[in-house]
Amino acid sequence: MLAARKDYMTFPDHLPIVAPADSVLGPGQGNWTYKEYANLSDDGNHYEVVDGVLFMTPSPGSEHQSAVGEIFAYLREHIKLRGLGKVFFAPLDVELAQNVIVQPDIIVILNDNRKKITHSRIIGSPDLLIEVVSPGSVGYDRREKQNSYARAGVAEYWIVDPLAQNVELLILEAETYRSEGVFQGKSTLPSRVVHEFAVPVESFFLA
């Protein structure tokens, strides 16, 4: 089941974007579940499933990886020191529903939800998900993924922009996200999931 590279094409003046992987052999768009997703061959591409649609996502850039590494390091130290739960980073599958399988950049599972962690994947909604956006993924992260996270009941969602060096913190209320604001510089994040996380946002982008 090899995907044609035309699912997203890279030209000198075009950035790769997240796009439906229509050419991948399988059950047909709209019908993908974890079973079919888990049987995909390793063709070097990165896939996710949202509402049964298989998407191909571009490889992350250096700014993306740097921000993910810094945020993960700070969160892991904070959460481990206080014995709050577990922190993971991509690639790790999160099965939010039978037809929604994603690989968020950073995943936080508090102790009360540790039973959702299995050997192969996380099954159910984590307490906090973090996505580091790029020009080619920002629409997908703010539309398909954000809607899926809200429907699954993910309590908190951070959208990190390494180019603008800021973080938007979204809180789930009445099955939809409300923005607590966009934070940058020496501001800290008023997280309801990770209490007393007193790391200035600028620290995520200094590496």
Image: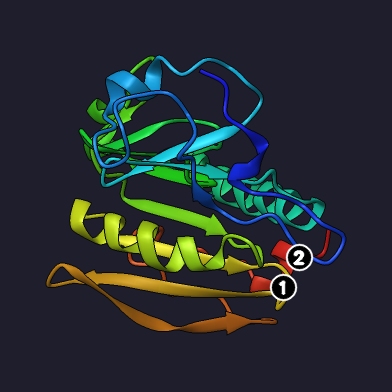
Q: Secondary structure at mark 1?
A: helix
Q: Is residue 131 above or below residue 182?
A: above
Observer-nearest of 73 and 196: 73
Q: Are marks 1 and 2 in contact (CB under 8 Å)?
A: yes
Q: Amino acid at mark 2?
A: Phe
Number of residue marks: 2
Q: Is residue 185 left or right of residue 156?
A: right
Q: Nearer the viewer, residue 135 or 62?
A: 135
* Vertical arrangement, residue 150 with respect to residue 110, above or below: below
* Identity of the residue furthest to the left in this view: 174
Residue at label 2?
A: 205
Q: Residues within 10 Å of mark 1 (few under 14, many from 20)?
A: some
According to the picture, the residue beneath numbered tag 1 turns out to be: 202
Q: Residue at x 65, y 46 (%)?
A: 58
Which corner quadrant holds the C terminus? bottom right
Please give left or right for residue 7 compared with residue 49 in the image: right
